[in-house]
């Protein structure tokens, strides 16, 4: 058999075993932010497409015991992704849209005093024409990138006839995600990342600002609400991960918990018992899983979809959306992003022991994880959250799941305006 593909005429072979590069241009060592255009290496994208073409699928079980994707995405989904990636997906079209949609910048920020390494960052910065606009830092999680905010940035910046609350938006890719190069040294905890984002906001001239967070970005926001509390006007989140303590579990065992507490404990126990293996792997062996996943783009897309599918409130992702999400992590290599779980769940000071903060906090809770047993995963009781934060606003939505800025962007934008607008008028 003869390989006809141009990549096998020799271009690919010298790459084997080479140290990995970012596969995109990055202006290291810019101490003040410089305009940035995303530009991924063409040969790398072609190799990725070839890998998608060579995807090897795994068979399904012959019964329906995996109907809810407990074990992984079904074969048909994976084969469709591989075909779409090989035959019709065009990264450079997407890249043009990302570049033209928003104003992109790059900068390298000094690390915090106790972690002395420079932190290169890519971020979107969109300023409102309104001089009174509220500076707002958007912090995404895994497996997202700044693209999680694609649908909400423009409405937040512009406001509309029914809202005069506008924002100057700063939306970074977390280090190791998208086009922010991964940390090259261990110990870059959520707390330290928060210090770096505070420095970023200040280099842009924002002494006081709001934070809107989700997922791993929520952990960063939680630390910022303590470490740099004087910088924050408020913290808005659509995520709040809290496990029952032993007293809660004892009360639960004795039927002394409220209906709301019981529903939450049941959902979160089911989640950690059946759906959280990815997080354990990321936090315990990020390099091993990163080595495997950085070699298979379709396999990695399946890995992120396995997480996204049950918690997206039925949102029907297109192949293009999933492939783009996967690529945003895959282009620089997935290890750095995965490794943030190690830093988030395993680092000192313990990332899960959030210090209590008085920063006004808005909890928005979005229902609709559609899978059996985890329906109430997002419905943390208010008084539990108050163990850590100053909850001044809480709302519940039937739908939205874990990515409401993607699946319910209008409602998410309304909530952000409502909370920060209310902080300014003194409603909260
Ligand atoms: C960035 O600056 C550091 C220290 O000044 C230097 O060692 C490094 O080579 C520079 N990196 C690049 C990519 O220019
Ligand atoms: C571009 O912006 C539009 C909304 O203005 C959004 O729907 C779309 O997802 C964005 N695309 C990218 C790639 O960011
Ligand atoms: C928006 O309008 C309301 C009422 O018209 C006013 O109280 C509030 O201060 C305005 N907010 C901003 C940010 O201009
Ligand atoms: C669990 O949290 C509740 C509420 O803050 C508290 O009263 C209780 O002491 C906690 N239990 C443990 C074991 O920390
Ligand atoms: C709690 O309630 C369940 C169902 O109503 C019941 O089966 C169980 O015996 C109760 N447990 C205790 C400790 O009261
Ligand atoms: C204003 O924006 C919100 C959220 O994006 C949207 O739901 C609402 O329909 C908009 N109102 C007008 C009058 O355009």
Image (tube, rainbow, N blue to C red):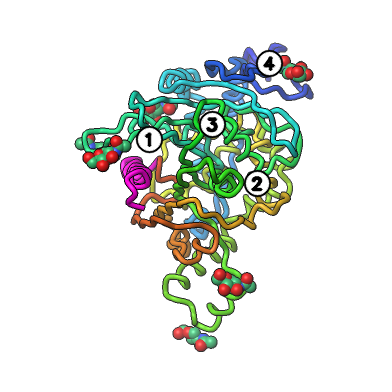
Query: How many angstroms separate mark 4 from mark 2 (CA)?
Result: 36 Å
- The dominant secondary structure in magenta is helix
Q: Quadrant of residue 166?
A: top left
Q: Which residue corresponds to the image point at 44% horizontal and 35% vertical from the top-left? A: 149
Decide which of tag 2 and tag 1 comes sooner along the chain: 1
Query: How many angstroms separate mark 2 from mark 3 (CA)?
Result: 24 Å
Q: Which residue is mark 2?
A: 341
* Magenta stretch in the rendered image: 406-428
Where is residue 89 drawn, in percent x and y? 47, 25
Is residue 30 on the magenta stretch?
no
Q: Is mark 1 within 8 Å of ligand 6?
A: yes
Q: Nearer the viewer, residue 238 or 338?
A: 238
Q: Which residue is mark 1?
A: 152
Query: How many angstroms separate mark 3 from mark 4 (CA)?
Result: 46 Å
Instruction: Between label 1 and label 3, give the one nearer the viewer.
Output: 3
Q: Nearer the viewer, residue 19 or 188?
A: 188
Query: If the picture is divided into quarters, which one holds ligand 6?
Result: top left
Q: Secondary structure at mark 2?
A: helix
Decide which of tag 4 and tag 2 comes sooner along the chain: 4
Q: Which residue corresponds to the image point at 69% horizontal and 11% vertical from the top-left? A: 9
Instruction: Between label 3 and label 4, give the one nearer the viewer.
Output: 3
Q: Which residue is mark 4?
A: 8
Q: Check residue 116 in the rendering and tell me which mark sits there, or answer none.
A: none
Instruction: Between label 4 and label 1, give the one nearer the viewer.
Output: 1
């Amino acid at each position: 058999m003869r390989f006809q593909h141009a990549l096998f005429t020799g271009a690919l072979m010298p790459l084997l075993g080479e140290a990995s590069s970012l596969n995109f241009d990055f202006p290291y060592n810019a101490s003040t932010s410089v305009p940035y255009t995303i530009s991924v290496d063409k040969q790398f994208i072609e190799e990725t497409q070839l890998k998608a073409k060579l995807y090897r699928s795994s068979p399904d079980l012959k019964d329906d015991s995996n109907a809810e994707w407990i074990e992984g995405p079904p074969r048909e989904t994976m084969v469709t992704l591989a075909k779409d990636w090989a035959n019709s997906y065009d990264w450079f079209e997407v890249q043009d849209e990302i570049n033209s949609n928003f104003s992109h910048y790059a900068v390298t920020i000094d690390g915090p005093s106790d972690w002395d390494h420079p932190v290169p960052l890519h971020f979107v910065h969109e300023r409102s024409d309104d001089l009174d606009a509220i500076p707002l830092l958007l912090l995404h999680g895994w497996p997202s990138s700044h693209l999680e905010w694609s649908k909400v940035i423009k409405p937040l910046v512009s406001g509309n006839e029914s809202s005069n609350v506008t924002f100057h938006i700063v939306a970074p890719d977390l280090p190791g995600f998208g086009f922010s190069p991964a940390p090259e040294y261990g110990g870059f905890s959520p707390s330290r990342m928060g210090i770096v984002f505070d420095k970023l906001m200040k280099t842009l001239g924002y002494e006081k600002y709001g934070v809107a967070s989700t997922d791993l970005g929520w952990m960063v926001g939680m630390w910022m609400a303590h470490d740099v509390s004087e910088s924050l006007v408020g913290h808005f989140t659509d995520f709040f991960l809290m496990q029952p303590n032993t007293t809660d579990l004892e009360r639960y065992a004795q039927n002394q918990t409220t209906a709301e507490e019981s529903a939450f404990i049941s959902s979160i126990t089911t989640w950690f018992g059946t759906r959280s293996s990815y997080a354990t792997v990321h936090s315990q062996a990020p390099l091993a899983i990163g080595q495997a996943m950085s070699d298979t783009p379709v396999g990695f897309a399946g890995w992120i979809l396995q997480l996204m599918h049950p918690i997206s409130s039925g949102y029907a992702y297109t192949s293009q959306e999933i492939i783009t999400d996967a690529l945003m992590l895959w282009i620089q290599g997935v290890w750095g992003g995965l490794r943030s779980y190690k830093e988030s769940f395993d680092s000192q000071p313990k990332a899960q022991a959030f210090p209590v903060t008085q920063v006004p906090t808005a909890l928005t809770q979005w229902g609709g994880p559609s899978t059996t047993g985890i329906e109430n995963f997002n419905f943390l009781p208010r008084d539990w959250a108050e163990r850590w934060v100053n909850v001044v606003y809480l709302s519940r939505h039937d739908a939205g799941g874990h990515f409401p800025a993607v699946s319910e962007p209008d409602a998410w934008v309304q909530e952000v305006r409502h909370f920060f607008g209310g902080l300014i008028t003194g409603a909260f």
